[in-house]
Image (cartoon, coloured by chain):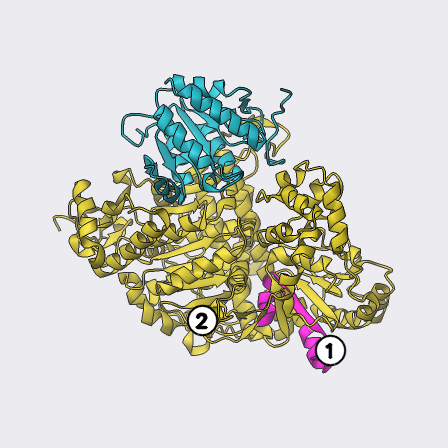
Amino acid sequence: MGVKAEPWQTAEIAGPKKALLILKPEVVVAMVKRAKRPILVVGHLSAEEYSDNIKMIDYAIRMSRTAGIPVVATAHTTTEFIKKKFQPAAWMSAMDIGNRLQDPEWKGLDGKGPYDLAMFMGLPYYMEFVILSALKHYSTGLKTISLDRFYNPHATWSFPNLSVKDWNDNFEIMLNKLGGK
Amino acid sequence: MKIKELKTDVGTIKDLEVSFGRIFEEDWLEPVGPTPFPSITDLREWDFKLLQRYKPFYLPFCDVCCLCTFGKCDLTGDKRGACGLNMSAQQSRIVLLACCIGAATHIAHARHLVEYLIEKYGRNCPIDVGGVSVEVEAPVTRLVAGIRPKILKDLEDVLDYCEEQVTHLLSATHTGQEGSNLDFESKVLHAGMVDQVGMEIADMAQISAYGFPKGDPEAALTEIGWGVADVSKPVILVIGHNVPSAVGIIDYLTDKGMYNAVEVVGICCTAIDMTRYSPTMAKIVGPISWQLRFIRSGLPDLIVVDEQCIRADAIVEAQKVKTPVIASSPKNCLGLENRTNSPAKEIISDLLEEKVPGVLILDPEKVGEVAVETVMAVAPKRKKFKIIPEIEDIIKAGQECTQCNECMRACPNNQPIPEAMKAAAKGDLNPLAEILENCVGCARCDSACPNDFPLHSFMVKAGEKSLMEEKFKIRVGRGAIQDVEIREVGGPIVLGEIPGVVALVGCANYPRGGKEVAEIAEEFAKRRYIVVATGCAAMSMAMVKDEEGKTLYEKYPGSFEGGGILNVGSCVSNPHIAGAAIKIASIFAKRKLRANYEEIADYILNRVGAVGVAWGAMSQKAASIASGFWRLGVPVVVGPHGSKYRRMLLGRKDKEKEWYVYDARTGDKVYAGPAPEHLFTAAETKEETMVLIAKLCMRPNDTTKGRAIKLTHYIDLHKRLYGVMPDDIHLFVRNKADLPITMKDEVLRILEEKGWKERRIPDPTLLPRLIRKRKGE
C-alpha cells in the first residue's frame, strides 16, 4: 500500500509512541469484536457534509447499531443524532469524556465498568490529537482508535491519511464485517 | 540598611544590619489582611482547595521533554525523565512557563509605561481612573498587595513585587526544582494573580496619565474595519500593545496642526488604546489576524510596531510592499539599527531613500515626529505599492496547483484551500473569499506551498470587495466599572437575578472566524446577562452588523447592567473585569478587601456568577490572564484551539463528594451541586460554549429566584442547541422553588426519574475560618 504514518496536520508530531496504521479495515473489526466494553465518541464535524451527501454521522449510527456500541455525542452533535432518530447513549463535552476515559475508577455511562476500547471520529483534528494523547499517557487498559480519515498519531490505532473514497470503502467493509458480531 | 561601623557614646557597633518590612500607609483605616504581597506559597492552601475539586486533566502535545541536555526524555505513560520528572509535572511545568511568559510580558509592559509616564508627567501624577465614581481605584492591587496607590510612584513598589514573584516562579521551572504537578499548578495560579496586578497597574497608569475614558459607560463610538482608512491620505499603521509611540504620533500631528493630513490606523490592542486616547484621530483596522492582509494590501505607507503579538516577519512583509518600519520597543527590535539618538532629519532621509528597511527608535516623541514626517514623504513615492496578485495570476496558479494538500495540512483550521484553488482555476474565487472569513491570518499555507504560491494573498484578493466594505462602530474602551454600578447590580448578581457576567476576552485564533464571538455576545445580552469584552474579542464583536446596519455597540448600552455590552479596553484592561467581581464582594457585600485574597476569592467562587470566554485564545498572555481568573474563582472557557494549552481544570459532577461546601451559618458540610462545574475547559463549538456559559454562571449561593432564572436560560439554550433537555438538572435544583415556572412539570418529571431529593441552600464557603457558629457552640 506504501502508506506513510504522517500526521495530517504537518507539525503535530507525537513522539516515540505512535499509532499503529490501520492498513486494512479488518483490524478495526477485530478490535471491536475483541473488545468487551467499546465506546464511540463522535464530534460535531461528523455532521458536516464532506462528499456527495455522505456524512460521517451516518457511519457512526450504522456502526453503533451494527455492533451495539454506545455513542457519546460531543458538543451539540446530539442535535444531529436526534434529527436522524438516533439516541446517543450520552452527550458531554469532548474534554469531559476524555477526562472520564482516562480515570481508571470511572465505571462508564452505565456504571458497569471501565471501557477497553474508545473510538473517535468527527472532532477537530488537533483537539482529538491532545485527547488521544491524554488517553495514551494516563488511561489503563484502554485502547483507542481514530476513525477519521486522517492519521492521528496519539491513538493506539489510526487510519492513515485517506481519500474520501478510500475512507468510505473502509467503512463499508467494516460495517459489513461487524454485522456478524 | 547596613552600617559597617558605628561609633556611639556607649561603644562601637560593627556590621550593623537593619531591615524594614513594607511600610503600609496609615490613612487607610481598613486593617491589613492576612496575605499582603503574598509569596509564592502564601496562598497554596487556597490553590489546593481549588485543585482538589478542579483536578488537572493533562493533554500532552508530545511524549518528550527537551528542556535540558539530559534529554530528550521519553515521558510516555508512567516513565520519568532523567531528572525524575513525570509527565503530569512536565505538563504543569509547561503551563507555568507559559503563564510566566504571559505575566512577565504584561508586567514588563506596565514597567515601561510607568517609567515613561513618570518621566513625562512626574512621580506625583495622581492615579485617577474614575474620580469619585471609582473610589476603589485598584481592586486587584488592594486585594493582593494591600496598598492603595495614589500617585504613579506608588505603582513602582507594586511592580517590584510583581517582578520578584515572576522571577521566583520562573526559577521553579528549572531542572531539579519543583517536582509536584500540584505545586506547579499552585504556582500557575500565583503567576496569574501577579499578572492581574501587573495589568491593572499598566491600565491605571495609562488611564490616569493619558486621560483615557474613566469608567465611562458612554465612551465614544469610533471606527473599526479594513474600509475605515481614508487611503487617499498617507497611512500610518501601528501594531502591538504598548501605546506611547502611537500617542507620540497623534500628539505630533496635533501639535503641527496636521490633523487631517495623515490617517492613523491600528491593529491589535495598541489600536484599542490609541482610540481611548483619541477616538477622532485614530481608527482600528481589526484584530491581530488582520496584520498580513493589511500590510500586503500596500495600504499602510509606514508601519510602527511596539510590542506583543506582532508578526515576527513584519519587517520582511513590509519590505515586500516598500513600506518602512519603525520598531519602538526594546522587546521587539527586529534587528534594526538603534537610531534613537540620530537627528530626525537623518532618519527620515534614510528611510525615504530606502537606505534601511526600518529603524529602531526608543523614544515615543521621536517616533511621532519621524513617523509623520516620513510618511508624508514616502506616501507619494510608494503609491500604495502592493503585492496582492491580480485575478489572472490566481487563475493561472489554480491551473498549476498540484492538489498536494500541503496548504490544508498546514492550516490550523483545516480550510479546504486545494478545493478553492480548483475552483479558482475555473475563474471562481468565491471559495477563496469564504476561506478568508475563517482565516486566522497565519499564512502557514504560504510557507507550505511547494509552488510558493502566496495563498493568503490570493484569499485577500478574492475577498477584497468585502474587505473594502468593512466599516463598523466600536465603543472606545471605557476602563473601570464604576462603584455606583457595582452597588446597583451587586445584589441582583449575587442573588442570581442578573443571571451572570460573561467576559469575552482574548486573541483571534478562532475556529470559524470572529463572527461567532458577536453571536455569543448578543445571545447573552438579549438574555440580560452583563457582557464585558477586551482586546481582540472586543474588536471581533464589533465587526458584524444587523439588518439595520448596526453593530452590537450601537444596539446595546455600555453600562454594567443586565443587557449591557461593554468594551472595557485592551488586554491590560482585563483586571477591570476581575475588579468588578472583587468590588461586588467588597462594596456590595462589604467583605474586607485589603490583602484578603482567599476570602474574596471564596466569595466570588461561591456567589458571583461570572465566566470568562476566550474563544480565540492563542497566546501565553491569554494563559496567564485565564489563570488569574481561576485563582479568583472565575471559570474560563476557551475555544477548541485552547485545548493546546495542554491542561484543563475539570470538575466531576458525577462525584458527589467533591461538591460539598461549609454552611457558614452552622459549620455543616452541605452538598452544593457542581456549581461552577469546571474552572477551565475547552469547548468544541460555539453552541457548546453558549450552553456552558449558562451552566457555569450558577453558584451555590443563588437564591431560589436567581437559580430559577439561571436554570431557565440553561435549559432553554440546551434544548435549542442540543435538541434535548439537560441530563443534569437534578444536580442544580435544590428545592422546588428553584424550578423555572414555565418548565415546572417537565423538570419535575425528570427529577422524579432521577430520584431527586430536596436539599438546603447553604451560606457557602470553602474556608472553615469563615464559619460563624460551629455545632455545639
Q: Chain of mark 1?
A: B
| Looking at the image, residue B240 lies above or below residue B485 | above
Q: Which mark is residue B705?
A: none
Circle nearer the N terminus (1, 2):
1
Viewer-proximal residue, B703 or A89? A89
Q: Is residue A90 visible?
A: yes
* Amino acid under disc 2: Lys
**Coordinates of residue A3 in the picture (x, y in percent):** 62, 23
Chain B rendered in what hue?
yellow
| Looking at the image, residue B35 lies above or below residue B364 | above
| Looking at the image, residue B71 lies above or below residue B726 | above
- Label 2, on which residue? B555
The residue at the point 28 percent across, 63 percent down is B497
**Coordinates of residue B421 in the picture (x, y in percent):** 68, 45
Which chain is in cyan here? Answer: A
Residue B385 appears in which quarter of the rendering? bottom right
Q: Which residues are magenta?
A: B250-275
Q: Which mark is residue B261?
A: 1
